Image (cartoon, rainbow, N blue to C red):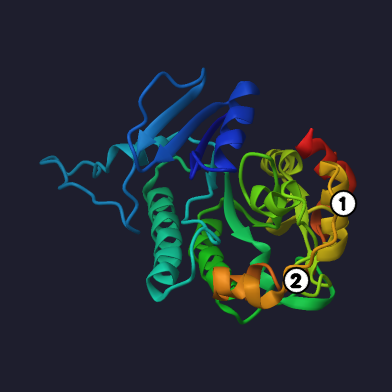
């Protein structure tokens, strides 16, 4: 099987590419920058410049088919496309320019892939579209599943637009999966290193009220769920990529303290977090969502790390 990954050099794309290559699949990573050095076996890098379109050269004198840019040729014989491309949500404060970059980086990369699929004579069968549980907005109430409506804040509207940009591929006959990812736990990136830093300095504890719910997933389970979705024809449409047991921020802090053998006693006030991170703090840190992976559970996906104590102990180890 040939898998094309956009955003394959990031926190999630890189280990996904490695896992697929180790499983003897051919993996092509679309990257904006030239990659030097010899890639792993069964893995290739192809440079692309996504701008929402694919420039098509003039038709041949004989009226033959148009030829498109090199990266689009990889779509022709791909079986699966995984789209994870987009600027990091919580990497910087949400200024007007940053919000615009978050939107355009997602819309243009997704638009380029969709246009390439439209022009491909032999189309892939599966399109995995990255998204986030931010789709549901900041809701501290009851549980949310794949049937829950979209929220109304900036992150929710961003996810709605990102998913909508991929919708046309379903009309081309592809099975579209919208992977709404929660807080991914891993030692080498994502939110956990920043959350763990105060604990390592013996000043860790809950953030804000501590009552906000964290819908998390161990990165190994994220990888397994994506590869499972590729291989499972019944998986289509929205899919929450979260563990089945979300926890409050206070519960998460206690669990992280146990994993690191550190106390969990010092609360970080909400105003301190807002001063440091701005608007992103209210959406991604101080508010919560109790999101459940009902689609995965109904189709009997098996979680390796269903509870946060086990997940954090494994990450720290």
Task: Give 233 or 162, whichever is nearer the viewer.
Answer: 162
Q: Are marks 2 and 1 in contact (CB under 8 Å)?
A: no
Secondary element type, mark 1: helix
Task: Give 129 or 247, whichever is nearer the viewer.
Answer: 247
Asked whether residue 234 appears in the rendered view, the answer is no
Q: Which residue is mark 2?
A: 288
The image quadrant where one finds the C terminus is top right
Q: Is residue 251 left or right of residue 5?
A: right
Classify 193 as above or below 247. Answer: above
- Counting from the top left corner in percent of width and height, residue 145 is at 79, 67
- Counting from the top left corner in percent of width and height, residue 174 is at 57, 50
Q: Earlier in the sequence, mark 2 or mark 1?
A: 1
Q: Which residue is mark 1?
A: 255
Picture quarter containing residue 140? bottom right
Secondary element type, mark 2: loop
Q: Is residue 14 left or right of residue 313?
A: left
The residue drawn where x is 31% and y is 48% is: 49
Q: How many marks?
A: 2
- In the image as oriented, which residue stretches furthest toward the left? 61
Task: Give 237 or 160, whichever is nearer the viewer.
Answer: 160
- Counting from the top left corner in percent of width and height, residue 170 is at 56, 58
The residue drawn where x is 36% and y is 49% is: 119
How far is the residue under mark 2 from the one under mark 1?
18 Å
């Amino acid at each position: 099987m040939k898998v094309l990954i956009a955003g394959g050099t990031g926190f999630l794309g890189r280990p996904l590419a490695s896992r697929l290559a180790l499983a003897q699949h051919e993996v092509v990573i679309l990257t904006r920058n030239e990659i030097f050095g010899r890639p792993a076996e069964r893995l290739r890098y192809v440079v692309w410049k996504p701008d929402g379109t694919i420039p098509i050269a003039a038709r041949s004198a004989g009226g033959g088919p148009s030829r498109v840019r090199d990266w689009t040729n990889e779509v022709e014989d791909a079986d699966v496309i995984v789209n994870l491309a987009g600027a990091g949500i919580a990497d910087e404060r949400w200024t007007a320019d940053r919000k615009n970059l978050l939107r355009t980086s997602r819309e243009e990369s997704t638009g380029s892939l969709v246009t390439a699929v439209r022009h491909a004579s032999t189309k892939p069968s599966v399109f995995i579209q990255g998204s986030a549980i931010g789709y549901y907005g900041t809701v501290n109430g009851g549980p949310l599943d794949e049937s829950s409506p979209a929220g109304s804040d900036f992150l929710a509207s961003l996810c709605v637009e990102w998913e909508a940009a991929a919708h046309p591929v379903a009309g081309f006959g592809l099975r579209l999966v919208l992977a709404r990812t929660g807080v991914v736990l891993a030692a080498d990136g994502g939110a956990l290193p920043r959350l763990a830093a105060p604990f390592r300095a013996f000043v860790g504890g809950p953030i804000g009220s501590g009552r906000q719910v964290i819908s998390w997933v161990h990165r190994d389970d994220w990888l397994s769920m994506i590869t499972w979705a590729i291989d499972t024809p019944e998986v289509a449409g929205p899919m929450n990529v979260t563990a089945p047991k979300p926890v409050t921020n206070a519960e998460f802090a206690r669990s992280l303290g146990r994993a690191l053998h550190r106390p969990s006693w010092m609360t970080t006030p909400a105003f301190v977090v807002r001063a440091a991170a701005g608007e992103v703090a209210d959406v991604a840190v101080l508010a919560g969502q109790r999101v459940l992976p009902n689609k995965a559970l109904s189709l009997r996906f098996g979680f390796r790390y269903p509870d946060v104590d086990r997940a954090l102990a494994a990450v720290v180890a």
